[in-house]
Structures are given as C-alpha cells and as structure tokens.
Amino acid sequence: MQLNFELVTYNEEQGKFELDKNKYQIEIDEEEEKTYELLKSSDMSLYNWVKESDFFKEYMNREVYQESENKKFAISDINGTSFIRFYFFKVTSGDSHYDYFMKLFNIHAESDWQDREDVGEEILERLSTKRKELILELG
C-alpha cells in the first residue's frame, strides 16, 4: 500500500511553520497496512504512529532530508487526513476548526454568547503545546 503524505517545515528562528509544497509517497508492508487501517479514523493516533514508525524515520532521513541534520518538520497530511489546521490556526479560522479543537482539547464554551475570540485564544494557547509534540527533528 502507498502512504501519501505532505509536510510543513518549522523555522525555529521565526517560530513559524512553512508549507512544503512537495507530495511524498512511501510503500508500507501488509503488517503496517493493517495498523494503518486500524488507526486511520483517529487523527492523533494515526499521526503518532507514522511519526514514531521506523519506516517513516528511515524514509525521511534517506529520501527527503538526507543532508539536513537537525531539520524540524511536521506532517500536514496523511492519505487525505489533514493536520494543517494545527500549524495555521488563527482566531478567525472557520467553525469546523473551532469545533475540532474544542472537542480535541475538551473546551466547553460557557454559553452561546461567549466571545469567539476568547475560545480562539484558549485554543491557540493549547495549540502552542500540542504543536511541539507534533514536530519531528532529524538528528
């Protein structure tokens, strides 16, 4: 099975993510495919499995960033499951992003009239920690 993915690179000096416009493919074996099928419906489980897998780390070192020691990057898409909102979320982002992060971070709005900016700021605060967990560093 082919695993298609996209990346974002992390610019530590500027403290921001930049989109890598390339699309990548990696072949996974039957055992890995079974694991993928089990995890594909759970965003964070899928992300963490790919991030921590030996096949992914080897591919990144050998094929993508072979001469980029200490390169920091993160996965923005795995087979159509997008993680891009983690890197480019803004207080003005759409409702679907708010709903996603409110559920992920277990944020409850106190009432319907609660200011969207307050919730957005809380999401941004929690995202600052989550983003660090998603970054991979080649060493």
Image (cartoon, rainbow, N blue to C red):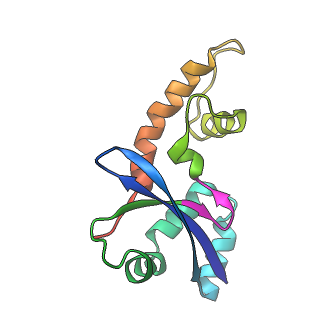
Q: Quadrant of the N terminus?
A: bottom right
Examine the rendered structure and indicate whether residue 31 appears above or below residue 12: below
Q: Residue 45 in the image: state x and y as whole percent.
A: 57, 60
Dominant SS in magenta? strand
Q: Residue 93 in the image: state x and y as whole percent.
A: 63, 34
User: Is 21 on the left-hand or right-hand side of 110?
Assistant: left
x 45%, y 31%: residue: 125
Of residues 19 and 108, the one drawn nearer to the viewer in this rendering: 19
The magenta-colored residue range is: 76-83
Of residues 76 and 35, the one drawn nearer to the viewer in this rendering: 76
Which residue in the rendered view is the most extreme toward the bottom? 29
Q: Residue 31 in the image: state x and y as whole percent.
A: 61, 84
Quadrant in which residue 128 is drawn: top left
x 59%, y 34%: residue: 106
Examine the rendered structure and indicate whether residue 120 appears above or below residue 128: above
User: Is 106 on the left-hand or right-hand side of 51?
Assistant: right
User: Is 50 on the left-hand or right-hand side of 30?
Assistant: left
Tell whether position 81 is magenta. Answer: yes
Tell whether position 102 is magenta. Answer: no
x 57%, y 55%: residue: 44
Q: Quadrant of the C terminus?
A: bottom left
Which residue in the rendered view is the most extreme toward the top? 113
